[in-house]
Amino acid sequence: QVQLVESGGGLVQAGGSLRLSCAASGSIFGINFMGWYRQAPGKQRELVASITRDGITNYAESVKGRFTISRDSANNTVSLRMNSLKPDDTAVYHCYAKRVVHGSPYDYWGQGTQVTVSS
């Protein structure tokens, strides 16, 4: 099992910044993909940013140039730096990890952290 614990959400004004962190613990061997998803009320969960074990990053078009995902392998932590926040970024942000063991994939989710951007 893998435990993911998020931190860093909160309330910020439009144009402001927040940094989310996700700490992974437990059976972290085999994790090859981590990312941040978000879900706003009445909307589907969407992938915001991701990073592979090799450091390849990917971003949703709506956050490119504003958000940056990074990882600290030594501390098993993935962070999401969010700049120039907009009210549309308001959502619950969930950390996600994919672990592959003997060819079988396993998905893990954090409990989520609320990000609210006021106009």
Image (tube, grey):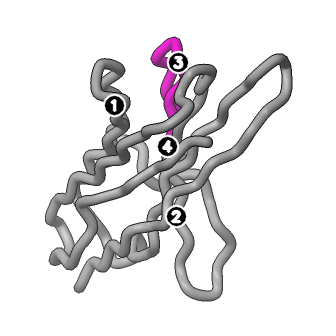
Per the model, the C-alpha gap separating discs 4 and 3 is 14 Å
Q: Is residue 53 above or below residue 75?
A: above
Tell me which numbered mark, 2 or 1, is placed earlier along the sequence.
2
* Mark 4–mark 1 CB contact (< 8 Å): no
Name the amino acid type tagged 1: Ser
Tell me if residue 61 can be seen. Answer: no
Who's the residue at 30% across and 48% down the image? 21
* Foreground tag (2 vs 3): 3
Tell me which numbered mark, 3 or 1, is placed earlier along the sequence.
3
Q: How far across and how far down the image is residue 47, in percent?
A: 59, 52
Tell me if residue 12 can be seen. Answer: yes
Image mark for residue 53: 3
Image mark for residue 49: 4
Q: Which residues are magenta?
A: 49-58
Tell me which numbered mark, 4 or 1, is placed earlier along the sequence.
4
Name the amino acid type tagged 2: Arg
Check disc 1 and report the residue beneath it: 70
Q: Is residue 88 above or below residue 81?
A: below
Who's the residue at 34% across and 78% down the image? 87
Q: How far across and how far down the image is residue 52, in percent?
A: 55, 23
Q: How far across and how far down the image is residue 92, in percent?
A: 45, 72
Tell me which numbered mark, 2 or 3, is placed earlier along the sequence.
2
Q: Secondary structure at mark 4?
A: strand
Q: Secondary structure at mark 2?
A: strand
Who's the residue at 23% across and 60% down the image? 8
Q: Secondary structure at mark 3?
A: loop
Task: Quarter of the image for the N terminus: give it.
Answer: top right
Who's the residue at 56% across and 31% down the image? 27
* Mark 2–mark 4 CB contact (< 8 Å): no
